[in-house]
Image: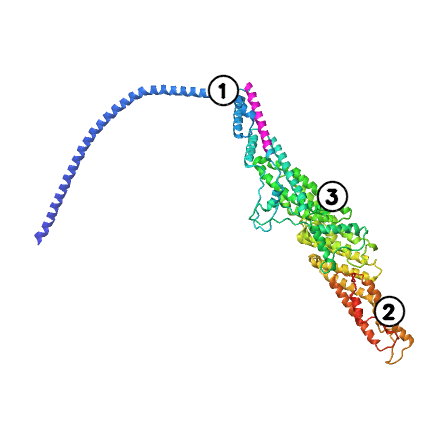
Amino acid sequence: MGVSSRMIPTEDASARKREIEEKLRQEQETLSFIRENLEKSDQLTKGMVSILSSFESRLMQLENSIIPVHKQTENLQRLQENVDKTLSCMDHVISYYHVAKDTDRIIREGPTGRLDEYLACIAKIQKAVEYFQDNNPDSPELNTVKARFEKGKELLEAEFRSLLTRYSKPVPPILILDAISLDEELEVQEDVVLEHLPEAVLQDIICIAGWLVEYGRNQDFMNVYFQIRSNQLDRSIKGLKDHFRKNSASSGILYSPAVQTKRKDTPTKKAPKRPGTIRKAQNLLKQYSQHGLDGKKGGSNLTPLEGYDHDLRVKHLSDALNEKHGAAAGKDDVLDIEIDSYIHCITAFVKLAQSEYALLAEIIPEHHQKKTFDSLIQEALDNLMLEGDNIVSAARRAIMRHDYSAVLTIFPILRHLKMNKSEFDSTLQGTAASTKNKLPTLITSMETIGAKALEEFADSIKNDPDKEYNMPKDGTVHELTSNAILFLQQLLDFHETAGAMLASQVLGDTYNIPLDPRETSSSASSYTSEFNKRLLSTYICKVLGNLQLNLLSKSKVYEDSALSAIFLHNNYNYILKSLEKSELIQLVTVTQKKAESSYRELIEQQIQMYQRSWFKVTEHLADRNMPVFQPGTKLKDKERQVIKDKFKGFNDGLEELCKIQKGWAIPDKEQRDFIRQAQRRAVSDAYRAFLHRCANISFTKNPEKYNKYRPEEVEEMIERLFDTSA
């Protein structure tokens, strides 16, 4: 066992030695291989170096041969290029001397029909001018091409004027109306585009204008532009006026069938509302101003409201005013047309001015657009403002004649101006202050004269004289009342305009209107709508108060107090019914909460005043002075005479009152029936009681002489009161 353990390490060492010796042998073989390869590489390197050295030597020889040749060739090429450039420059310079001759025919014939070719010729001439100015400013050729350039520029300016004049036409009235009208049945309005120039012509004009600005150094064409377009704008608006005068009076329509059939898939356009109610009011108010104030005609020929027997006359009057077919328009219809025409022309001006600016923006340089536009619209705008001033002047003269219907003409115009003021201002944005202030100045003038008319109308109601021959003989509604109510009713359609009109004159102090701090401002135009409403309410109450005082004064003209009461009753009732039927009552109650009840009290007071007229009839039926007797007792002569006198007094009084009051009038059927029934009941009951007391009394041998009427006959007689047809 001990021997085996010692032999194991010896065997391992031998194996290890053999392994190391094997590795050493392999490494020696590898080293030998590397050495052989290194020797081969050295040989190859030496061969390559030899080749490269030979190649380098040859390249140097080649370079020394080629470089002189290259330099000589490069010099020759440069000389060739210089010769070519010199020849080209000579040709170019020579061409400048021939420009005048080459372009003579085209310049003489002008740019019409060949603008691009013409501008190309102008460009050649311009380059020639620049060449001679830079290189030979003293040459005669410079003057020649300069003259040719100026001639070309003049012809371009002439072409600009010619194209603009030839193709600028007034916009047809039908197209204007189509553009400014709004169809209430259409949810989305179709925007009508006004094309002032054909597209091809417009492009030529834009091209010429651009050249004149950039190369022509000329702004005269802008004056030409605004003069021509200004004339067309003015002619377009005048054409619209003529359209109204020719067509509206004869046909009653403002739109040609051509407009209505233009878009077959859209509903037919509605003609704008005509101020027929205003015209009716003006007609009646003119009667009032001419007859009522001057006192040349008596009685009332005006129409009460619903519930009155002669109400049909209102409809007849309205129908007559609106009927225009088959006959020429009367004076009032002409005025209607003029009002409509002016309102539409204002709207048309805004629409046309906007389209003119859009056209101008394509032709005129941006920094000249506002000034040119300002000049372009002046003539048409001045004519519109002059027409507005004439309306104000006519209203002023009418007011001086106490024709207060003139204010009704101003209302629709003023409302339209104020409604369109923002769009008007937007259209004129950037123009001179004098231009922008024209419309506000006109609005202020209309508000001033309108407020004056309102105030003077209120004063005229208060101061209308009490003339006996101007009073209705039957006690019906006075013309003054009808006119005043009719006038106030017209204010309903323009309540905002009327309120602002009063506020613009700072009339709050006049009416003692309490101001809310939120409604006060340094300018009357900033009053709120609520304040204007209260101001108008106070004005209406003032007119009604003046009317009431005047009616009370007029009623004293009647010698018969009963007729005076009927007169006041009719007028108070007419006022109340008018207020209730219209929205006037809502406006009145803004400042007078108890106005309705106050009028009802006044009406009741006058009914009671009238009923007192029957006391002289019914007093004969009272027990006063009636003899006291026992049944079957014979009356004394004096006692019999008392009864006879009572019968006679009743009969005579009844006959007299029925004869007189039958000719009086209570137009309101409801009130007429109420007063008849109340009086019939009161008299009939008293008469029946009197007959019952006298039934068994023998006071005469001829009872039929005194007992002339049965109670039913008395009732029939009273039932015929206030019946002028009976």
State whether residue 513 appears in this view. Answer: no
When the figure is inspected, residue 362 is found, relative to residue 465, above or below; the finding is above
Front: mark 1 or 2: 2
Q: Secondary structure at mark 2?
A: helix
Q: Are marks 1 and 3 in contact (CB under 8 Å)?
A: no
Quadrant (top left/top right/bottom left/bottom right) for the N terminus: bottom left
Judging from the image, the colouring scheme is rainbow
Q: Earlier in the sequence, mark 2 or mark 3?
A: 3
Which residue in the structure is indicated by mark 2?
Answer: 649
Which residue in the structure is indicated by mark 3?
Answer: 393
Identified by mark 1, the residue type is: Ile
Q: State the mark number for residue 530.
A: none
Q: How many marks?
A: 3
Q: Is residue 56 left or right of residue 490?
A: left
State the predominant SS element of the stretch in magenta: helix
Q: Position of residue 422 (x, y in %)?
A: 63, 45
Q: Position of residue 285 (x, y in %)?
A: 75, 51
The crowding category of the residue bearing disc 1, from other C-alpha atoms within 10 Å (few below 14, some 14 to 19, many at least 20), is few
Q: Marks 1/3: CA distance?
A: 74 Å
Residue 158 included in the magenta stretch of the image? yes
Q: Secondary structure at mark 3?
A: helix
Q: Secondary structure at mark 1?
A: helix
- What is the residue that sits farthest to the right in this orientation? 637
In the rendered image, which quarter is residue 76 located in? top left
In the rendered image, which quarter is residue 226 located in? top right
When the figure is inspected, residue 140 is found, relative to residue 268, above or below; the finding is above
When the figure is inspected, residue 49 is found, relative to residue 468, above or below; the finding is above
Identified by mark 3, the residue type is: Ser
The stretch in magenta equals: 139-164
The crowding category of the residue bearing disc 3, from other C-alpha atoms within 10 Å (few below 14, some 14 to 19, many at least 20), is some
